[in-house]
Amino acid sequence: MDLLSQLRGQIADFSAFLHREGFVDDQFTQLQKLRDESSPGFVVEVVSLFFEDCEKLVNNMAKALEQQIVDFKQVDSHVHQLKGSSSSIGAARIHNVCIAFKTCCEDQNRNGCVRCLQQVNHECIQLKNNLQTLFNLEQQIIAAGGSIPAKQ
Amino acid sequence: MGSNSIVSNRRMPEKMNCFDLSPNSNSDSEAEEVHVLAVDDSLVDRKVIERLLKISSCKVTAVDSGWRALKLLGLSDDEEEDKSSSSSSDGFEGLKVDLIITDYWMPGMTGYELLKKIKESSSFREIPVVIMSSENVMTRIDRCLEEGAEEFIVKPVKLSDVTRLRDYYMATREIRSAGSGINVNKRKLQESF
């Protein structure tokens, strides 16, 4: 099997894994379809923006939860933002944690919120690593003379 | 054959008398492209909606707040609302847009409030406004449609949502500009049932 076919096999398997484990959902696939010659870096760009946003929000939430008196409305508005953007890029696991996180905010449950924040952080790191692997595979395909997306 | 005959001469020039038959005439190609004003406070969502619209052959202007949208349109005349350092010059005409798509939940001015301001304005009320929201709340949807929103889209927005919007807009634009009196306002259609 030539290198290109091997790489394509790898990326197909890895994508299937990401979907199966719920790291990404159909919305991510939708975004991948929006790439073309004029905007080949679209997915990488949006994903990068998402993680920048995520980091800022996580920091803000951490600060808010450290306060003597927690402003749950503020935490909730950060969670709402993260919930929205994670849904827009298809980051399913992060989105799901945000749903639970919102409930904790509504219940004014500080411990629950802290736990959710830790989970969000964990999921963000995992997704970042996974998507980096995916993008690396794509780069390798391009270097081997293939194109992304593959001609179907 | 008389020189006024239309059907017989195959090599007739594209422009004849008052009929411009060229498929890419200036006014037509600019008018064909739908110009959408997208409003969303989330940078990620703005990038996504921008791409969805561009891929659907729409021209896009994306802003991060209702205030900025109103300023761009030329609707905002309140000095206090101008928090940006750039001031609009005298004689600023305002952006011409065919469709406005806005997020519902934004800090400062919600999409609903933006919708109201647009529908209250005599010069802008004809512009179709579409609301997007991550929450599928019936009362919210009804409120927006009552206020004159063309459609309510639940996020995440997909390509199929955007192409459907564009097609709907293109189809109803003919009716709108013909001024045939057919009211394509969704609210009115609902009331007639």
Image (cartoon, grey):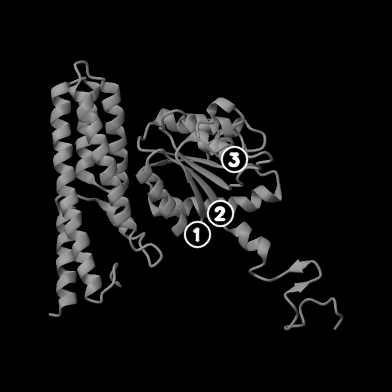
Q: Residue furthest right?
A: B2
Which residue is most to the front? B85
Bin the neighbour count of mark 1 within 10 Å (Cα to Cα): few under 14, some 14-19, many 20 and up.
Answer: some
Q: Which residue is mark 1?
A: B57
Image side of residue A6 versus residue B69, left or right: left
Mark-to-mark CA distance, 2 and 1: 8 Å
- What whole-number distance in Å separates the C-alpha atoms at marks 3 and 2? 16 Å
Question: Amino acid under label 2?
Answer: Val
Image point (48%, 31%), residue name = B112
Q: CA distance from mark 1 to mark 3?
A: 21 Å
Out of B4 and A31, give the one closest to the viewer. A31
Front residue of this view, candidates B183 and A101: A101
Chain under label 2? B
> Mark 2 sits on what residue?
B34
| Image position of A60 (left or right of B130) | left
Q: Same subunit under labels 2 and 1? A: yes
Q: Please identify the quarter of the rendering in which residue B138 is found.
A: top left
What kind of element bears circle 2? Answer: loop
Q: Chain of mark 1?
A: B
Residue B73 has which mark? 3
**Label 3 element class:** helix
Picture coordinates of residue B47, whole percent (x, y): 39, 49
Numbered circle sitting on residue A23: none
The image shows residue B148 at horizontal and vertical percentages of 55, 34
Indicate the amino acid at tag 3.
Answer: Leu
Position of residue B22 measured from the top left corner of the image (x, y, whole percent): 68, 71
Q: Earlier in the sequence, mark 3 or mark 2?
A: 2
First of labels 2, 1 by sequence position: 2
Above or below B118: residue A130: below
Q: Give x and y (percent) for residue B93.
A: 66, 43
Are the residues flagged by discs 2 and 1 in contact, CB closer than 8 Å? Answer: yes
From this viewpoint, is residue A62 visible? yes
